[in-house]
Image: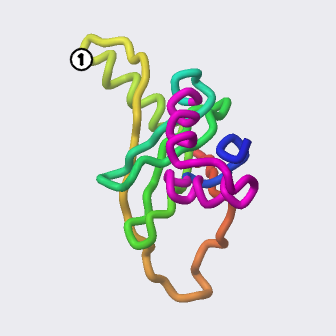
Amino acid sequence: MIVLAARDYPDVDELHSRVRAANPRISLATLYRTLRLLVESGLIERHTFRGSPARYRSVGDEHQDHLIDVTNDRVVEFRSDMIERLQGEIAAMLGYRLTGHKLELYGEPVRTPQRHRAPIGARRTRLST
């Protein structure tokens, strides 16, 4: 299925274009119903980043946090053991056991001289923290 194979965060219009390329008879209503069922079944996640249209992504094995590039709406997934640990510590200090969280960071690329730019890598990044 196209939504399960997506490696980006397509919105409904992007998904509909992809689905119709494979089967022009698929309606937008059918896509919405299918997305709802896939979200309810836990196969995909629905994300809404700061007022943008809902985006969809297949559920991965490991929790990911998100950095959204405000200049082009690109979503960068990352994981930081330090952030995960700190969130648990904060919850414990406040008398809670953390059962889940959602972290979204918003930023724009820092313009640096070409020779100092980090190479563009995979969308998923593991920070060594």
Magenta range is 10-38
Amino acid type, label 1: Leu
Q: Nearer the viewer, residue 103 or 96?
A: 103
Q: Residue furthest front?
A: 25
Residue where numbered disc 1 is placed: 94
User: Does the magenta run of residues contain 33?
Assistant: yes
Label 1: few (<14), some (14–19) or many (≥20) C-alpha neighbours in 10 Å? few
Q: Main secondary structure of the magenta part?
A: helix
101 over 1 or under it: above or below? above
Q: Is residue 79 visible?
A: no
Quadrant position of residue 118? bottom right
Q: The N terminus lies in which quarter of the figure?
A: top right
Q: The C terminus lies in which quarter of the figure?
A: top right
81 over 116 or under it: above or below? above
Q: Residue at x 32, y 20 (%)?
A: 91
Q: Residue at x 62, y 86 (%)?
A: 115
x%, y% of residue 58?
63, 38
Q: Is residue 51 left or right of residue 45?
A: left
Q: Nearer the viewer, residue 86 or 65?
A: 65
x%, y% of residue 77?
55, 49
x%, y% of residue 122?
68, 59
How is the protein colored in the picture? rainbow
Q: Nearer the viewer, residue 26 or 18?
A: 26
Q: Is residue 87 left or right of residue 44?
A: left
